[in-house]
Image: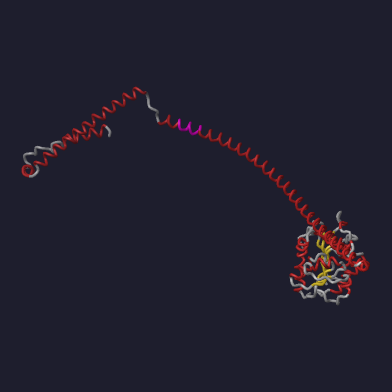
Amino acid sequence: MSHARVADALDRLEQHANLHLPLRRGDLLGRLALRFLWRRQQKWQVETNLAARDAVSALSDELRAAEGHFQRWLDERGELVRAESLHKELESLYRNDQNLAAGLNQRLYSAVGGLQAQLSGLALQVTESAERSGGAETRLKELETQLERVLAAAEQVRLRNVQVDLFLDRARREPEAVPAAAGAVPGRDSFLEIAVEALLDGSAERARDAVRAYLPIIEEARKSGATGAVLDMAPGRGGWPSVLAAAGVRYRTASRNALVRKQCEAVDVEVADADPMRLLEEATPGSLGAITAFRFAERLEPAALARFAELAAAALQPGGPLVVETPLASADFHLDPFALRPVHPDFLRFLTEAAGFSHVEVRLPGEAEVPVTAPGGRERYCLLAWR
């Protein structure tokens, strides 16, 4: 409360302290009312006004005393900080805070940059480690493949040993039958054919999974009307004929190798005891739904290969495909002791087109259309020809 307001309040209380009494002589009605009605209330109101005046007067004295004390306190402590100086000090603190924040941000960015560099180095190390582990994984797979080949070869060796033991037992029991029995013992080449299959294609399951990619070609031909049996020229261990049988496709195949026939019988594949080329020669013209030849073309002389293409063109139904898969020329081509020479894709195309096939495709490794990759990782290509 200001000094002016306190003074004004004291002035008004002083003016109205006695309620403007006594009344004027001419105010008879007021005198009469005061005499009979309001004397007691008037006395209380006067006392209230006096008490209020005394309170305000005491408040004014206290205010002046407080101002005196405050002034003496100021005199003792000097001049108080003004608003302008406070504003300047706040601005200084704000600038200092900004400078400090900028310094911290710079150090933070520097630290983040260092961390990013370290993370990049770690990522590079992880990549190199992954590459090394990938190389180790590839090597492990190669070792597993080699182990499968060794196990397959060992199985063939055990089989040959069993055959030899049976022959010796029979020779001991019936010496006179030895000349006849000698002809029934499979030759070394018979065992070698199965062993080579395992060496080049890995396990029988792996080879069967690889050639299964050709099944859609056969099924598409059957939809177009080529519903005759599929003639397979080289049954091997029976992988491809078993795929056809599982799909409900009729097949025919032949081999003069007794061990090949026995191996195929073990997987419920029926193989005729005949030369597969003779089987193709005897086929009724336009009776076969498809002809397949895996690991076959490279084992033929050029004249025999040309004859094979001509017979295939004659025996196939319209829309029936000829499927030939054979290796490209490479350093490991002669791992197959039965292979005579690589068959160049252009030469094989020439033979099939000359035999009368209307549409010929050669699908090389690395192309998206190639349906199969050689299980052993060796480069092969396939030729597809349609009547």
Position of 113 with respect to 22 (left or right) is right
Can residue 290 be seen here? no
Q: Is residue 111 above or below residue 339?
A: above
Q: Position of residue 245 (x, y in %)?
A: 76, 70
Report the quarter where the N terminus lies: top left
Position of 74 with respect to 107 (left or right) is left
- Front residue of 308/332: it is 332
Q: State which quadrant residue 145 falls in.
A: bottom right
Q: Residue at x 11, y 42 (%)?
A: 41
Position of 376 with respect to 311 (left or right) is left
- Front residue of 34/98: it is 98
Q: Is residue 109 above or below residue 323?
A: above
Q: Residue at x 23, y 29 (%)?
A: 61
Q: Position of residue 200 (x, y in %)?
A: 82, 58
Q: Position of residue 268 (x, y in %)?
A: 77, 69
Report the quarter where the C terminus lies: bottom right
Residue 95 highlighted magenta (yes or no): yes
Q: Residue at x 37, y 25 (%)?
A: 79
Q: Position of residue 113 (x, y in %)?
A: 63, 39
Could you tell me what secondary structure mostly forms the magenta stretch? helix
User: Residue lying farthest top?
Assistant: 76
Residue range (magenta): 89-96
Q: Residue at x 58, y 35 (%)?
A: 107
Q: State which quadrant residue 84 falls in.
A: top left
Can residue 175 be seen here? yes
